[in-house]
Image (cartoon, rainbow, N blue to C red):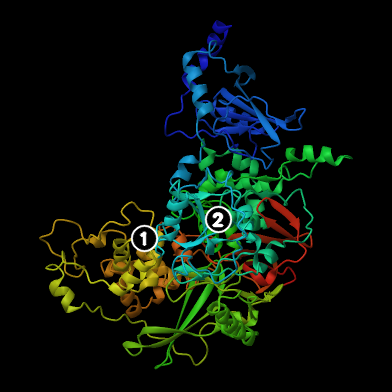
Amino acid sequence: MATDLGELLVPYMPTIRVPRSGDRVYKSECAFSYDSPESEGGMYVCMNTFLGFGREHVERHYRKTGQSVYMHLKRHVKEKATGAAGGAMPRRRNGKVFLDLELNRDFNGDDYEYEDEAKLVIFPDHYEIPLPNIEELPALVTIACDAVLNAGSAYKKQEADSWEDELQVSKHARSLRQHDSGVRIPPSGWKCAKCEMRENLWLNLMDGTVLCGKWFFDGSGGNGHALEHYRETNFPLAVKLDTITPDGADVYSFDEEEAVLDPYIAEHLSHFGIDMLKMHRTENGNHTDNHVQTRASEWEVIQESGLKLKAVYGSGFTGIRNLGNSCYLSTTMQVVFSIAEFQRAYVGNLQRIFDYSPLDPTQDFSTQMAKLGHGLLSGLYSKPPIKSELIEQVMKEEYKQHKAISPRMFKALVSKGHPEFSSNRQQDVQEFFLHFINMVERNSTGSENPSDVFRFIIEERIQCCQSQKVRYSQRVDYLMQLPVPVEAATNREEMIAYEIKRKDAEENMRAPPEPVRAHVPFTACLQAFAEPENVPEFWSPALQAKSAGVKTSRFASFPDYMVLQLKKFTFGLDWVPKKLDVSVDVPDFLDLNRFRSIGLQAGEEELPDLMPPIVIPEDTRDSSMNNSLESPEIDESSVMQLAEMGFPLEACRKAVYYTGNMGAEMAFNWIIAHMEEPDFAEPLAIPAYMEPDLPSSSLATASPLDNQPPEESVAILTSMGFPRHHSIRALKAMNNNLERALDWIFTHPESEEESAGISDMIDSEPKDTSFSNTNTHSDSMLSPDQGLSSPRVRDGPGRYELFAFISHMGTSTMSGHYVCHIKKEGRWVIYNDHKVCLSERPPKDLGYMYFYRRLSSC
């Protein structure tokens, strides 16, 4: 038989490879579907490319590549046998096969076991060779098979590159013996048992002692009494009190000397009278308040907890498993694939996209979009439990049903190279939406661009307050950001009374009162959007000098789908991000027609098209070359503000320098964008300065102006609302000095010729795509080498109907959880990761992003 197998494989030996260190072996997810080894047909792994395919798609790869040898992997999930004593008796399983395969199901590992089966399959005759078959197979084939079977996850390398390592379960969690001391932890008024510290407090999970820390990674202050207590008692686990939420808490193991996971944290906390479901983390400064809110209304109301929600199955009702803080991606894609244009562009063209996909479909955006759309809309992965007359039989069979999809391949592709989305941290769903739109734009060249439905034109009118003359310009946008004026709340008196009671309770170490949420009318948000905005340091061409300016924004076109975001996230006085706790009565029907731009009006006089003179500071001209190696001038107060937040001092100095001494907020944004870089905390190194207006023939090196400005500098300017091309001109003119570039922009308004390409986009192809946004980060999300043409902007009446909204629970965009509600077949449906149910009370007033479609009757 050995000879027969050897001769059989001889023609295919040149195509069989042994995976090298850089190869990714896709053995848990099909490149074209969400089939896995647990699926009925199993998984076929190409022994040359190491791509995985379900039974339905493996033939396509064979026809396209001619590759004939595949490893077929099949996992059989079974209920554990029960012994005479009633306990589970696990069966022996092959520990070598699928050594590092991710599970795709939510069955209880204590009740079920799995057996793995592997074989080589030769196409087109489907000749099967069972594995392992070491003695009968050629040595090269045996080595290749062994390497594939033992290969790590195709996504482990990317996960390892994330900013933070995955936490491990503490070895003490399961066996932790808590003392029955009767200790009960109050909801507020915490203080270290050995000193007067009221912040950075840690609860020892064995005896309930509350002590201050000093040793943890977040830089919080303290006297180290929690560590001293461990050295005295050897009680290993502690939880930081102000991090407890319904989703978990920060746990540290003194014995293991690292942050850990405690799967039993809810049980361990309840021992001391703490109910995790009623805990709510609040932010205050660079540490969290030393009290916990007892109200869980935001989490409960948004997730509709406590209600008996009916699960729904079938096409359009497929859930998406959370891959670890990936709910921002899941909610976005659920909404996107409820839009007909995206369904048609990807799912409607599924076979064409698959047939013409590249040799590596895992790296093709259109292929992965078609795969995701089909997974959500086909109903193949959303089937109801098998009906049975006996409840026991239903429970036994339920694990076999496809309940959701796990989009690991899609997430790896759309987040590739992005410092935030490639990490395992929570992200802002609005920023991901714009990042996703950017990817759709870049990958729709020469084909239908479904993101056209979101694109619209904003017209900005700037008026010189002294001369009363005006200038009109236009920009492209994809969503409408609405300010949330808390001062316009209808329950201000109630809020003031609550704040008084809260402070009194804190001072007297009593339980805090029930929090009061601000109720802001939606009309007040629209009014805040429409109000004129002051433009400081505006250079008026009419006066040929700086003057006060006023800017207003209106819609030059209305998209088919209007995306509206409430600006709930802001910065505190110390630049720490925080979330406004507000309720806004967002309407089901929206009429924006009154915000349509009307252009230049009779009696209005346009500002002359004049450019101000470029003024080069004398001190810069005279001393730039002589002082190029001297220490730069840095705003030390901003540096110290950042350093007090726990960031390395040298990183703070670089952040302030590279943002042109424009304040701690700008520098904070720079830190967040660069904290993964290897030289993040290295000392600041300043290159020799070269004055752009003073070229020197004695210098053989090229001028810095020959290079593209740093993308982070461009992103900072565009995030402030300046057009991309204008920001690049300013940076080039000022040798990439951000502070001077900002001044240049104010003194060099965008000319009519520069914006002329955008003004004609409604009727013709644009000459330039400057995707700047006064209120959003859309420009920073778009590629710097975006093409010079894009599809036309759609326009129509500005009357819309709400069909979806995404809600956020938590205190920051970097924490918490997202769910979405989508109106389908006349009913609201809640999508909470893998759970898809009919909504009973859609919390429209607590949403974060809202999606409207144009009324068909318009």
The tag on residue 817 is none
Q: Amino acid at mark 1?
A: Glu
Disc nearest the viewer among 2 and 1? 2
Q: Let me know if residue 412 appears in the view.
A: yes
Q: In the image, residue 423 lies at what x, y percent? A: 48, 51
Q: Let me know if residue 597 appears in the view.
A: no
Q: Amino acid at mark 2?
A: Asp
Near mark 1 (Cα within 10 A), the count class, few <14, some 14-19 or many ≥20, is: few
Q: Secondary structure at mark 1?
A: helix
Q: Is residue 68 left or right of residue 334?
A: left
| Closer to the camera in the image, 171 or 711 | 171
Of pointers 2 and 1, the one earlier in the residue sequence: 2
At x 79% / y 41%, what residue is drawn? 395
**Distance between the alpha carbons at the discs numbered 2 and 1:** 52 Å
At x 57% / y 26%, what residue is drawn? 97
Q: Secondary structure at mark 2?
A: loop
At x 31% / y 88%, what residue is drawn? 545
Q: Is residue 181 left or right of residue 600?
A: right
The tag on residue 207 is 2
251 above or below 652?
above
| Closer to the camera in the image, 424 or 609 | 424
Q: Quadrant of the N terminus?
A: top right
Q: In the image, residue 399 lies at what x, y percent? A: 73, 39
Q: How many marks?
A: 2
523 above or below 117?
below
Based on the displayed image, in which of its 4 quarters is residue 837 positioned?
bottom right
Q: In the image, residue 158 lies at what x, y percent? A: 46, 44
| Closer to the camera in the image, 139 or 300 | 300
Query: Which residue carries the number 1 mark?
Result: 711
Q: Quadrant of the C terminus?
A: bottom right
| Closer to the camera in the image, 848 or 175 | 175
